[in-house]
Amino acid sequence: MDVIRSAFNWKQVGVWALAAVLAAFFLVAGGLKLRGAPSQVDNFAHWGYAAWFLYVVGAVEVAGAMGLLVPRLAGFAALLLGGTMLGAALTHLVHHEMKAVPVPLVILGLLAVVGYARRGPVVAFYERLTDG
């Protein structure tokens, strides 16, 4: 029984650690966008996005980072940030920046792990919406 319980605890520790690393990543990435770092402004202009979109993405990343650290919100945050990473991968793909495509896809995979581990509130919300 103790072996099973300790394995469960290690899984929880792993999920917390992964969520914390992802939260730190998105806090930095979103912070750079919200600050209007020249490299970020140049990238968004190169991709043809409006200047305001930089700040929307930055706000989504910072909000998602905070959500990853709250277990009841982590599943929702993983979905939100996963959509952002899918958009990032597609942006790189459309602009033929093939070397940059794997990075958001790997982050998307890591977000999927956190999202799956913290899926309870998302499933409950879905069931409430569908009366099922």
Image (spheres, grey):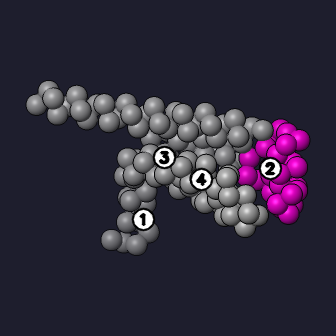
Residues at marks 1 and 4 touching, judged by CB atoms closer than 8 Å: no
First in residue order: circle 3 vs circle 4? 4
Magenta stretch encompasses residue 106 = no
State the residue position of label 3. Answer: 110
Mark 1–mark 4 distance (CA, rounded to whole Å): 30 Å
- Which element type, helix, strand or loop, lies under badge 1? helix
- In the figure, is residue 94 to the left or right of 82? right
- For the point 62% across and 37% down, the residue is 25
Magenta stretch encompasses residue 40 = yes
First in residue order: circle 2 vs circle 4? 2
- In the figure, is residue 9 to the left or right of 41? left
Residues at marks 2 and 4 touching, judged by CB atoms closer than 8 Å: no
- Which element type, helix, strand or loop, lies under badge 4? helix
Q: Which numbered circle lies on residue 102?
A: 4
First in residue order: circle 1 vs circle 3? 3
Query: Neighbour class for label 4 at 10 Å: few (<14), some, many (≥20)?
Result: few
